[in-house]
Amino acid sequence: MDPTLWQYQFRIIMLGDSTVGKSSLVKRYTEDNFLETINETVGVDFYVHFFEVEPGVRVKMQFWDTAGQERFRSVTRSYYRNSVGGLLVFDLTKRGTFEHIRDWHAEVCEHVLPHKVLFVLVGHKSDDQGKRTVSREEAEKLAGILGVPYIEASAKAGHNVKETFELLARRIYRGLMSGDLDLHEGWDGVKCATPLALEAHRRSLPHSDPTHKQKPKCCA
């Protein structure tokens, strides 16, 4: 099978403060590469990875790696609306980055309406337990408040990196199959490979009745 063939395309945005390791995570996943020193992202960087979300169903995952610095926020905000997934990343060794997660989540929710973004909360740098400032219990509590899954990962050690991204991809796919996520004209968060695939997908949804109107949802 041609590795570049896909049925769905998911656009996913990397969110979190500067230096939490968003670029390291996405590079480890897409390139299986880790650099001890990496330049801070300026604006937005772009990555692609293909993944078989279930047997016979291949998705193209597009990652927008956003700059965490405030001076680039006006640039990164423009990418929120066309994202279907978001990784909310904080550094387990820097408590301030954890305390800002609610702000990142709220900002995305504000900008995506009437569309919906699905999130996963990621505690990064789990390899550095000696410097940890955020406990698993309080991270899981925040995840519960936000209604999102929580996972701890390390790009340096390669721990839970694949699991992090694929957890989000499967969550998006389940949302599509259940009808919890809607496909909209002019929205690029999710794309089907062909118009025929899009029509077949719509017919398969629980609310395929054209008279059904689903109330827009924001984030989860």
Image: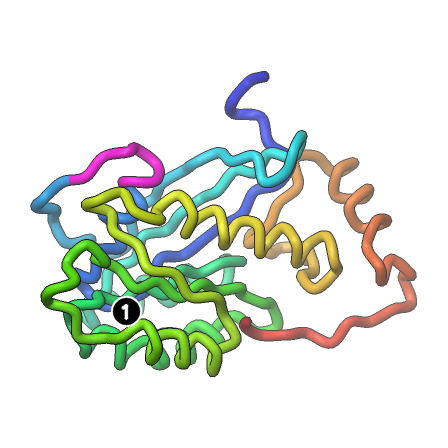
Asked if 27 appears above or below 146 in the picture, the reply is: above
- Looking at the image, residue 181 sits to the left or right of residue 93; the answer is right
Crowd tier of the residue under label 1, counting other residues whose Cα lies within 10 Å: few below 14, some 14–19, many 20 or above: few
Where is residue 13 drawn, in percent x and y?
A: 40, 57
In magenta stretch: residue 10: no
Asked if 120 appears above or below 101 in the picture, the reply is: above
- Residues 133 and 69: in front is 133
| Quarter of the picture holding the N terminus | top right
**Residue lying furthest left in this view?**
37
- Residues 129 and 9: in front is 129
- Looking at the image, residue 3 sits to the left or right of residue 200; the answer is left
* Residue at the image position 48 percent from the left and 42 percent from the top: 61
How many numbered discs sit on the rendered protein? 1
In magenta stretch: residue 33: yes
Where is residue 124 drawn, in percent x and y?
A: 26, 59
- Looking at the image, residue 143 sits to the left or right of residue 219; the answer is left
* Residue at the image position 58 percent from the left and 67 percent from the top: 116
User: What is the secondary structure assignment of the residue under circle 1?
Assistant: helix
Q: What span is in magenta?
A: 28-34
Asked if 195 appears above or below 65 in the picture, the reply is: above
